[in-house]
Amino acid sequence: MDTLIALGTSAAFFYSLFATIFPDFFLNQGLMPEVYYETAAVVITLILLGQLFENRAKGQTSEAIRKLIGLQARDARVIRNGREVDVPIQEVELDDIILVRPGEKIPVDGEVVYGTSTIDEAMVTGESVPVKKQPGDEVIGATINKTGSFKFRATRVGKDTVLSQIVQLVREAQGSKAPIQRLADQVTGWFVPVVIAIAISTFVIWFNFMGNISLALITTVGVLIIACPCALGLATPTSVMVGTGKGAENGILIKGAESLELAHKIKTIVLDKTGTLTEGKPTVTNFVTVRGSANQNEFKLIKLAASLERNSEHPLAEAVVRYAEVQDVELTDARDFEAIAGSGVQGYVASRFVQIGTKRWFSEIGIDTNLFAEQKHAWESLGQTVIWIAVDGEVEGLMGIADTLKPTSIEAVRKMQKMGLEVVMLTGDNRPTAEAIASEVGIDRVFAEVRPDQKAAVVKSLQTEQTRRKGKNKNPQSKIVAMVGDGINDAPALAQADVGMAIGTGTDVAIAASDITLISGDLRSIVTAIKLSKATINNIRQNLFFAFFYNVLGIPIAAGILFPIFGWLLNPIIAGGAMAFSSVSVVTNALRLRNFQLKGEYNS
């Protein structure tokens, strides 16, 4: 890009130098030995001034990274040898126990081991509501502790923390090239030689027709300077830097410019069920007890059931225990605990023999289950898993357990459908459960009972199916399909999709295989990411207009096309100013993306 400027200013300077040293050469031909030192000096000054403004503006595009780096705590209060020691964050080691007091930043990623609190995670996840944390919950470095004191065990330190990974990935994304940028590079590749050819032709034509070397030189220099495609090179990178930075500020981690560009072309969104549409952990949704029995008091039966289940590692057992904790039920010890694989658990709690398990198991051991037959069928039709509770050989209660929907899933699906996207659910769960969840969120098309190794094939079939509807079989991926998932079993499908979106609360493998990470796990971020993609691409197109507008309009004027009619010539100084203003216009327009309101999309 500097070739044209170097040629133009060098031509003006060395022509002036020749006219200064050998004025007689021009006088003998009846020409004035005019000099253009000021042209070369002012044009270079304008270019440097434009680049100064450019660099200052481009510096603002990396504001997101500076903000993220600035979030990190500098010190950590580590408990070593029974004493609290303040150490620099770089010296924190894995498995260190760290104390955090109210109002302090959490230094590294970890798991709460003692105490409860609420954490403001907005600066990392984009979630504005503080999140309650208790033992066993994960905390993210750089987030702010709001209310209580707690201790946590460091699980990720240094470059492995969530914040460090975000910073690194944003840097890589901002340095990557979108497909539209490669097109601009190709245009620039032939644009410079064409402009040089136009400049030479301009010089030859004016010198031959007018015999005036000064006129030929001034038009040639004007063409070289005003045609400089500096703005063309800035058009895409600046918008990509602002777009990815804006996403990172709000919990949407875009790994590359290509993903950012592709997102606005998505036609089909494939959603995993567990952990994506749903919370990813079973929850007791229904509970009924036998009326008139000695254990009809719900709290008594919950106490018996949860006291037994807390000895089990099964996810359904964890749901029962969590349900008891929410009800503030005080648990007791169980003895003679026994787990029967695929059936249930049994043991003694406070001298009562308690059994919890499936209807099939209860039938096998002779426990009558007819009492709750209607509730069982009703709950199973809603996709719930039903477990039976028996005390001393008699059925006393029934629990319905389900993986509940995230609070925002229904709204997110509705917004995606409103945008004209086809929303598909893909899950390994049984069909009744899958269809019940799909019906609840408003999804019509469901792929159920799909094994992990089959998920990528389903995504691929959707990609080719989209093109068959348009009759374009030769290009099976011309329609863009996005996959959203959170588990290891989703990684192949995320890699197969044109745009893979991982839930940030999921596994590292899924996040690594994806193109976009939704750190907060809020599916409404999908809508925001697509709208951010559209805004960024529109911004790039506007930049390309600014980049080409001055060149296309200015080259003929600089070449002197208006001189024979109006006697107008474009001064090289004005050409340099216009070229510099073109670059400043592009960068300024790109910075408008910083005003894109992501949170407002949630309320639209």
Image (cartoon, rainbow, N blue to C red):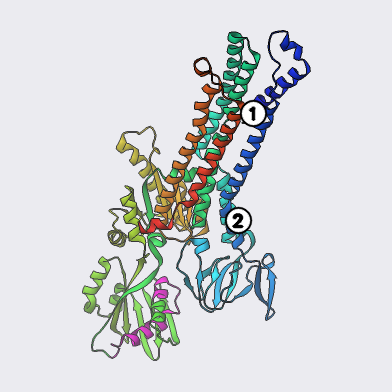
Quadrant in the rendering for residue 538: top left
Q: Say what amino acid the circle numbered 1 marks.
A: Ile
Indicate which disc residue 5 carries: 1
Quadrant in the rendering for residue 7: top right
Residue 212 in magenta stretch: no
Q: Quadrant of the C terminus?
A: bottom left
331 or 13: which is nearer to us?
Answer: 13
Q: Left or right? Give the position of 178 relative to 440.
A: right
Q: Say what amino acid the circle numbered 2 marks.
A: Arg
Q: Reply above or below: 490 against 103.
A: above
Instruction: Tell me the magenta residue range.
Output: 294-319
Q: Reply above or below: 337 against 55.
A: below
What residue appears at the point 60 percent right and 24 percent down from the top-left corner? 222
99 or 423: which is nearer to us?
Answer: 99
- Residue 38: give x, y in percent of width and height: 68, 28
- Residue 175: give x, y in percent of width and height: 58, 44
